[in-house]
């Protein structure tokens, strides 16, 4: 047990130290604000504050973990050995040159997403507005890297300190915006599609549409047998998340109540975890979200646990509060569609902290770092995709994190002209957990 002295045990302090010490490093801790208890403790310990108490192991703090609400914070990012950090401290006895605990809290809570910023065309917080992108550390799990630097300092002082280390693992996520491209869409949408194909002289597409309709060809977006075969080769904790929102400008899936649609969802749920791709409308509307949640639960006959937001739009804190209200356990939206990288600076799951209420919530956020969404113009072939993925794997393995790639089922089809994505997903599935 590691004892930590702080001037005041705030919700922010408890949240941050539990994330770094317990969830990232596997170290049991206790917090105290009583100097007498700290001095009497004869085991491993350190203090965190403006000034050291004496000659103990000491980490200097800035004000963030002892504040309430949002404030205008100046962020100065500096190089730190092989990584970057901010909230530099100057005390001569400080064991680290940065307050990594406040920096961690800033990134995990998405503090910057509460502050004024320019949204993209879909109302999302864009990667280009983040400090990770601005200062060039978006591609690094800096929170975990800082955690391991902290670990080294602890071991230098207390060589016998015991850590229950977590292991590197992979959670592939399949986001299903459209279960079918031609099949089960109803006569009006089918005829409309044919007219559109003829008008734009897309005769190959017209031929495919007819073949699928008469049953001589499988629907191109129905790549679920491929996913099931991968699942059979290795029991990964994959998540397949289906969109069941009503038809709109952003949601183009077929009706949730069509028998073949329900059959596909039930079938894949026999092999892996199935959840909900929250529609664009449901992200900020509790009643719409509740309706979609009931749809997937009625199909699966089990409680919804896993979700991803359309376009990875997370309207903080409303979207996450709605998930909590409906007792949804896990979110996989914490990332960007057009840029790879660690939106929250970590490859370790963390609890959502509500900055308005100053409370840790039960919602577990899984931050992905790679998505094969449309609009990724930087990846043209399997070579560039594998190179990028391998670079992330190397970084995540060093800190025993979780590699979470998000794949669109539509890009696994032959229609988008990027058939190499199937080989990439297969490559990921063959990587061994450690």
Image: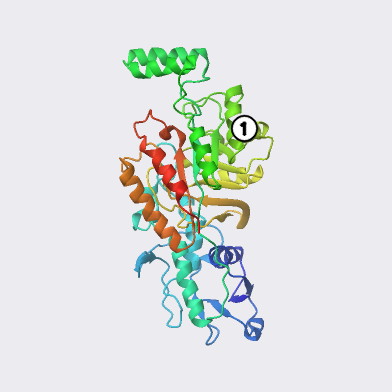
Q: Which residue is mark 1?
A: 266
Q: Is residue 38 left or right of residue 223?
A: right
- Residue 166 lies, in percent from the top left, at 55, 63
| Near-viewer residue (424 or 138) | 424
- Residue 300 lies, in percent from the top left, at 65, 34
Residue extending furthest front?
A: 233
- Please determine whether, in this image, residue 99 is positioned above or below residue 276: below
In the picture, residue 277 is in which quadrant? top right
| Near-viewer residue (161 or 100) | 161
Q: Is residue 306 left or right of residue 431?
A: right
Q: Is residue 46 visible?
A: yes
- Residue 71 lies, in percent from the top left, at 49, 59
- SS for dot 1: helix
- Residue 108 lies, in percent from the top left, at 50, 57
Residue extending furthest right?
A: 301
The residue lying at 41 percent from left, 31 percent from top is 413
* Total numbered labels placed on residues in the image: 1
Q: Is residue 371 visible?
A: no
Q: Is residue 222 left or right of residue 285?
A: left
| Near-viewer residue (138 or 357) | 138
- Please determine whether, in this image, residue 97 is positioned above or below residue 245: below
Q: Residues within 10 Å of mark 1 (few under 14, many from 20)?
A: some
Q: What colour scheme does the image use?
A: rainbow
Q: Is residue 84 left or right of residue 40?
A: left
- Please determine whether, in this image, residue 279 is positioned above or below residue 383: above
In the picture, residue 392 is in which quadrant? bottom left
**Image quadrant occupied by the N terminus:** bottom right
- Please determine whether, in this image, residue 73 is positioned above or below residue 40: above
């Amino acid at each position: 047990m590691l004892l930590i002295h702080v001037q005041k045990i705030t919700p922010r302090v408890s949240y941050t130290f539990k994330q770094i010490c317990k969830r990232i490093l596997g170290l049991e801790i206790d917090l105290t604000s009583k100097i007498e208890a700290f001095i009497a403790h004869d085991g491993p310990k350190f203090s965190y504050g403006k000034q050291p108490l004496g000659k103990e192991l000491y980490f200097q703090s800035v004000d963030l973990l002892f504040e309430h609400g949002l404030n205008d914070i100046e962020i100065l990012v500096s190089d730190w050995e092989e990584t970057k950090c901010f909230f530099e401290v100057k005390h001569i006895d400080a064991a680290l040159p940065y307050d990594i605990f406040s920096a961690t809290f800033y990134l995990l809570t998405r503090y910057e997403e509460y502050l004024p910023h320019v949204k993209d065309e879909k109302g999302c917080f864009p990667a280009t507005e983040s400090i990770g992108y601005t200062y060039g550390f978006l591609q690094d799990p800096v929170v975990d890297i800082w955690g391991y630097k902290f670990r080294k300092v602890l071991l230098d002082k207390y060589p016998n300190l015991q850590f229950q280390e977590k292991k590197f693992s992979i959670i592939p996520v399949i986001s299903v915006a459209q279960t079918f491209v031609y099949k089960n869409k109803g006569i009006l949408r089918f005829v409309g599609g044919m007219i559109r194909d003829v008008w734009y002289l897309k005769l190959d597409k017209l031929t495919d549409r007819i073949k699928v309709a008469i049953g001589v060809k499988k629907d191109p977006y129905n790549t679920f047998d491929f996913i099931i075969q991968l699942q059979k080769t290795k029991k990964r904790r994959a998540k397949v998340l289906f969109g069941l929102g009503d038809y709109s400008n952003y949601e183009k899936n077929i009706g949730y109540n069509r028998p073949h649609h329900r059959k596909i969802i039930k079938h894949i749920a026999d092999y892996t975890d199935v959840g909900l791709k929250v529609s664009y409308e449901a992200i900020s509307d509790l009643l719409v979200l509740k309706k979609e949640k009931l749809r997937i639960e009625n199909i699966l006959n089990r409680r919804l646990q896993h979700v991803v937001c359309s376009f990875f739009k997370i309207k903080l804190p409303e979207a996450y509060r709605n998930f909590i209200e409906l007792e949804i356990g896990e979110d996989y939206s914490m990332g960007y569609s057009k840029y790879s990288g660690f939106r929250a600076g970590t490859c370790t799951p963390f609890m959502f902290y509500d900055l308005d209420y100053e409370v840790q919530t039960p919602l577990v956020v899984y931050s992905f770092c790679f998505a094969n969404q449309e609009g990724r113009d930087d990846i043209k072939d399997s070579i560039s995709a594998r190179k990028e993925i391998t670079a992330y794997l190397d970084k995540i393995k060093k800190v025993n994190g979780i590699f979470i790639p998000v794949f669109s089922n539509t890009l696994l089809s032959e229609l988008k002209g990027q058939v190499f994505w199937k080989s990439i997903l297969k490559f990921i599935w063959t990587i061994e957990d450690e």
